[in-house]
Image: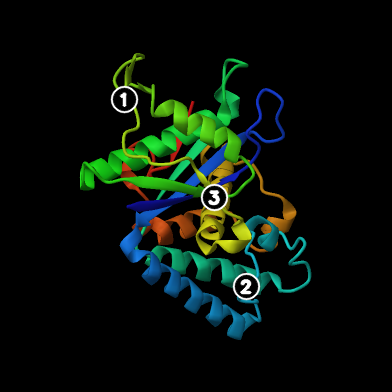
Amino acid sequence: MYLSYFDESGDDGYPLTSSNFFVLTSLYFHESVWKENYTKIVNHRKYIKEKYNFPIKFEMHSKEFVSDKNPFHGMFTPYQRRQIIYSFCVLLSSLDLKAINVVINKKNINRDSYDVLKNALTYNVQRIENDLNYLRADAKFMIITDEGRISKMRQTTRMIQKINYIPSQFSNDSYRKEIKNLIEDPMPKKSSESYFIQLADMLCFIISLYAKRNLCSPNDTWNKRILNVLNYGDEIKLLDKLKPILNLKASRKNAYGIVCYP
């Protein structure tokens, strides 16, 4: 059995929207390495508690942390926040897992009926299944996610197990390929109670920085709060550190395997 943890960044609304793109990230691994991965995370949390006084059970919201917003406001210097984010990336790169990142670029959507979350989740789940089929045809997996979008995710995963059309890489056509190995509905879990969802949140945040500068709006700017901690180019350095866990085969069009549609 494989476990997949999901988190997102941005607004999944369209055409009424507050963001130009939406990011959906998954971290997945076999159940047999859960304990080993979890122990590494706990040990890292103990390390940053000792070095930076970051409480072990404190929930890590990466965007708010880097931006010095509540509940982190005033707790760390910009240098400390930078060092902590880099240390979490080093941790994530050392874990026995893989990651898939999907970006929906709303600027390229040409119809009001486009369902942002449905498409992002379908693309992500399809690539998890493709990878597991390569490893073992009968490998099963389940989804664990925060509670915010659980109803829509449940609706989507039920649908793509019954009927699912995949865009062809070689033409404008599509073909049917239903999801076979996903079991159960997505299981809700509070992000405050899952280190894995918090790490998915961190990777999702880094992907959103990368997408803003390199995918959706080339040379677009970050907000000043983020620039107090990270410089342009840090998103590349962080993704280079994370390459060992990125599923690069998820998209051959991107150096980091980031899937970008439409």
The residue that appears at 62% across and 34% down in the rendered structure is: 12
On the question of residue 230 being in view, the answer is: no
**Residues packed near mark 3 inside 10 Å, few (<14), some (14 to 19) or many (20 plus):** many
Q: Can you identify the residue that label 3 sits on? A: 204
**Residues packed near mark 1 inside 10 Å, few (<14), some (14 to 19) or many (20 plus):** some
In the image, residue 228 lies at what x, y percent? 70, 62
Q: Which mark is residue 89?
A: none
In the image, residue 149 lies at what x, y percent? 61, 40
Label 2's element? loop
The residue that appears at 58% across and 48% down in the rendered structure is: 209
Q: Can you identify the residue that label 1 sits on? A: 177
Going by the image, does 6 lie left or right of 170?
A: right
Label 2 vs label 3, nearer the camera: 2
In the image, residue 130 lies at what x, y percent? 29, 38
The Cα–Cα distance between marks 1 and 2, rounded to whole angstroms, is 41 Å
Q: Which mark is residue 57?
A: 2
Going by the image, does 210 lie left or right of 80?
A: left
Q: Are marks 2 and 3 in contact (CB under 8 Å)?
A: no
Label 1's element? loop
In the image, residue 42 lies at what x, y percent? 50, 75
Displayed quadrant of residue 122? top left
Residue farthest bottom in this picture: 50
Q: Amino acid at mark 1?
A: Lys
On the question of residue 160 being in view, the answer is: yes
Going by the image, does 143 lie left or right of 197?
A: left
The Cα–Cα distance between marks 3 and 1, rounded to whole angstroms, is 27 Å
Q: Amino acid at mark 3?
A: Cys
The Cα–Cα distance between marks 2 and 3, rounded to whole angstroms, is 21 Å
Q: Are marks 1 and 2 in contact (CB under 8 Å)?
A: no
Label 3 vs label 1, nearer the camera: 1
Please tell me which residue lies in front, 40 or 137: 137
The residue that appears at 42% across and 27% down in the rendered structure is: 160
